[in-house]
Image (cartoon, helix red, strand yellow):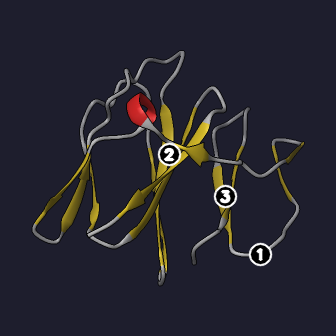
């Protein structure tokens, strides 16, 4: 499931994931896929392994004006998506899997980050 396409509605914040080319619309708008850029340095999210869990620390302020809208973990066998909301300051806990994190801000920026052993 690596290299999935992600779509996020600017009106309602709905997130759609696709494993192939599709046309996606929401709230009467045609959505373009999100194109994440590699997260380097301060853009990267702090990640740690704790047993069989991957703990992602939300290192950005989760304000209503700008927050991480979703985090997805892509691995060889699937995609796990967690929708986030403003003013949530908790860590995100995912099952430990080697792969990539993909996340998007409510303001439209999107990032990806490799997760290794």
Q: Report x, y in % for residue 47.
A: 26, 49
Name above or below for residue 53 compared with residue 89: below
- Per the image, the residue denoted by label 3 is 16
Q: Secondary structure at mark 3?
A: strand
Residue occupying the point 57% across, 78% down: 1
Q: Residue 108's image quarter?
A: top right
Name above or below for residue 96 compared with residue 114: below
Q: Secondary structure at mark 1?
A: loop
Asked whether disc 1 touches disc 2, contact meaning CB atoms under 8 Å apart, the reply is no
Residue occupying the point 32% across, 73% down: 97
Residue occupying the point 63% across, 26% down: 107
Which dot marks residue 20?
A: 1
Q: Report x, y in % for residue 115.
A: 36, 62
Q: Residues within 10 Å of mark 1 (few under 14, many from 20)?
A: few
Q: Nearer the viewer, residue 86 or 45?
A: 45
Alpha-carbon span between mark 2 and mark 3? 11 Å
Q: Report x, y in % for residue 19.
A: 69, 75
Q: Residues within 10 Å of mark 3 (few under 14, many from 20)?
A: some
- Horizontal relation, residue 86 to residue 3: left or right: left
Which dot marks residue 62?
A: none
* Residue closest to the far bottom: 77
Which dot marks residue 70?
A: 2
Q: Nearer the viewer, residue 84 or 34?
A: 34
Q: Residues within 10 Å of mark 2 (few under 14, many from 20)?
A: many
Q: Report x, y in % for residue 68.
A: 47, 35
Of the numbered discs 2 and 3, the one sitting upstream in the chain is 3
Q: Secondary structure at mark 2?
A: strand
């Amino acid at each position: 499931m690596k290299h999935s396409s992600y779509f996020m509605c600017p009106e309602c914040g709905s997130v759609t994931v696709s494993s192939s080319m599709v046309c996606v619309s929401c709230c009467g708008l045609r959505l373009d896929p999100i194109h994440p850029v590699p997260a380097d340095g301060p853009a990267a999210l702090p990640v740690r392994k704790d047993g069989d869990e991957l703990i992602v620390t939300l290192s950005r302020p989760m304000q209503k004006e700008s927050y991480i809208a979703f985090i997805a973990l892509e691995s060889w066998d699937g995609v796990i998506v967690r929708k986030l909301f403003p003013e949530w300051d908790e860590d995100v806990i995912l099952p430990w899997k080697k792969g990539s994190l993909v996340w998007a801000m409510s303001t439209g920026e999107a990032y990806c980050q490799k997760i290794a052993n």
